[in-house]
Structure formats: C-alpha cells, structure tokens
Image (spheres, helix red, strand yellow):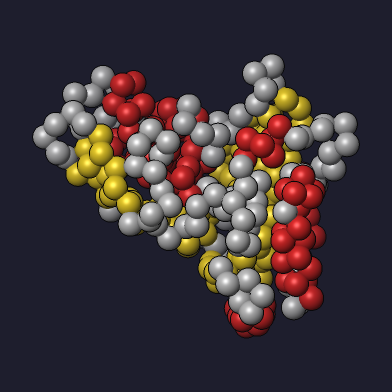
Amino acid sequence: MEKAAAKVNLGLDTTFRHDDGMPEWNMVMTSIDLADYVEVLDTGSQNIKVTSDSGFLPSDQRNLAYQAATLLQRTCHVKRGAAIRIKKNIPVAAGLGGGSSDAAAVLRALNKLWALGLSRQQLATIGLRVDSDVPYCVYSQTAHVTGYGEQIRVLEPTLDPMWLVLAKPNVSVSTPSILRQIEYESLEHPDIEGLLNAIDAGSYQQLVATVGNALEPISAGRYPEIRQIKSRMKAYGAPCALMSGTGPTVFSIFNKQSRANRVFNSIRGFCSEAYLVRSL
C-alpha cells in the first residue's frame, strides 16, 4: 500500500509563459497527512486496470494514475500489467494535488512491483509528462519547485510539524482555464525568497507573513466563495489564509493545535467540507 499525500502551496508564483504555453513556476510546496492510498497488484496480464471507491474519479485514460501506469509501462518496455486500487480521501479538483499524488504513488509502487530500479529523479522525469505536480509528489517533502515543475529542491525541515485547517467550497476549478487567464503584466508576485528564508530560519511568524499565491485573484474572481472562506478564517483568528494551487481549497497554518481547533470548529459551521491536518 502506497501513501499518496495531498500537497499545499505555501507559495505559488509564475514569472513567464514558455513558448509551448506552459507557465514557468516558482513554488514552495509541502505535504500534509490528508492522503489517498494506492495498492498495485500483479494480474498476470499486460492490461492496466484502475478502480476506486470514489464515484467522482474516472477509471480510464482521464485518470492520472492510469496515465502514469501506462506511460511507465511504455517507457520501460514492461510486458506486465497491474490492477490499481485507489482509496480516495483527498477531494477531487480541490487544488490539493490528489490526482498527481495518486499518479506519483503509482509510479513508486510499480517501480517496486516491476523491479525497475528507477531513482526518484527518473520517476519524476516520467511523471512530468503526466502533470506538472507529479514530480513534486514523487518526493512528497517540503520543496522549492521551479521550471515546468520538474526542478525539485528538497528543503531541510527546520520547523516542527504544523497544524493546517483546510476548507473546500462546493465548486470545482478547472486548472487549464485558470492558467489561460494569467496576465503577466498585472500579476502580483508573492515573496517566494522571503518564504524560503523563513523556512531556512525555522521562523513560523515569518512563514505566515510571506505565504502567497499569485493565481488566487484569478480563481477568486470567478469563485467568490474563495474570498468568503478567506475572510471567515481570518475573522475566526487564523494568522493567514490562502488558496492552494488553482483552488478552490483555502487553508491556514498554525503552530498550536488549540488555535487550529478553534478555527476548524468555527469554519465547519460555514463550510461543510473542512479538514484539520498536520504537515508531514
């Protein structure tokens, strides 16, 4: 059984668009203990089959886990198949990297099942062809992520595990549609360097002061629920509140469980899909 941890973007910025239309990323990401679980089994055939306990998850080529398995199979010329079972806990289309984390878990699990002996870097390179978040999810550690998402610099843990309160409004965000709306001339850039310095110094106060997401105004402009949840979190005493990925999930970070509990219990009265989790 392979754990597929959700991720949040402590900092998300993009500085330009590549010729192929994809953004150049500058992100700080960390993983949390909200996770899916992926099991892979040898079937004795060459077919890839994906099943899930979620009715919201496709089981064909639209599923990133399926794409990752077939891509690894083709790339490494594997003549074996696998049955992939996914137990979903991470909400779908939430900005938490659930699909990418499932795909990364499949790559790690099949690397063992098929005895391929690939390094994490090799798995990440393959994963990039599935989705830009997959390389990070292969590592699933706090990291500075740049390029298309393939340049991963794992950051040394200097902060104790933190508590996070997550709230997902009842909307689903299309990442491609948000990325198409980026206007680089007017984009407000978060302080990624300051965030990296905060992590390096082990300063929780500096961290909550420098978190930010350049895409938040775009998603919040389309989905006012994002701003509403942010306002509620801050009103309930959260030291910060920001969107993860392209949204719509909003989260806050706490160094004390008692404060996290208070905000979690309050936000549940406003947003039914809320989570209290820890950073890994």
* Residue 184 x/y as whole percent: 82, 32
For residue 258, above or below residue 18: below
For residue 171, above or below residue 188: below
The front one of 144 and 211 is 211
In which image quadrant can residue 273 be found? bottom right
Q: Decide if residue 194 is on the left or right side of residue 132.
A: right
Q: Which residue is drawn at 75% across and 72% down?
A: 232
Q: Is residue 255 visible?
A: no
Task: Count numbered badges in the picture.
Answer: 0
In which image quadrant can residue 275 be found? bottom right
Q: Which residue is the extreme one toward the right?
A: 186
For residue 48, above or below residue 94: above
* Residue 250 x/y as whole percent: 67, 60
The front one of 57 and 133 is 57
Q: Which residue is the extreme one toward the top?
A: 19
Q: Which residue is drawn at 63% across and 35% down?
A: 176
* Residue 272 x/y as whole percent: 58, 72
In which image quadrant can residue 19 be found? top right
Q: Which residue is drawn at 76% across and 52% down?
A: 220
Q: Decide if residue 174 is on the left or right side of residue 126.
A: right
For residue 235, above or below residue 214: below
Q: Decide if residue 238 is on the left or right side of residue 120.
A: right
* Residue 124 x/y as whole percent: 46, 33
Q: Can residue 60 be seen in this view?
A: yes
Q: Which residue is drawn at 77% across and 35% down?
A: 182
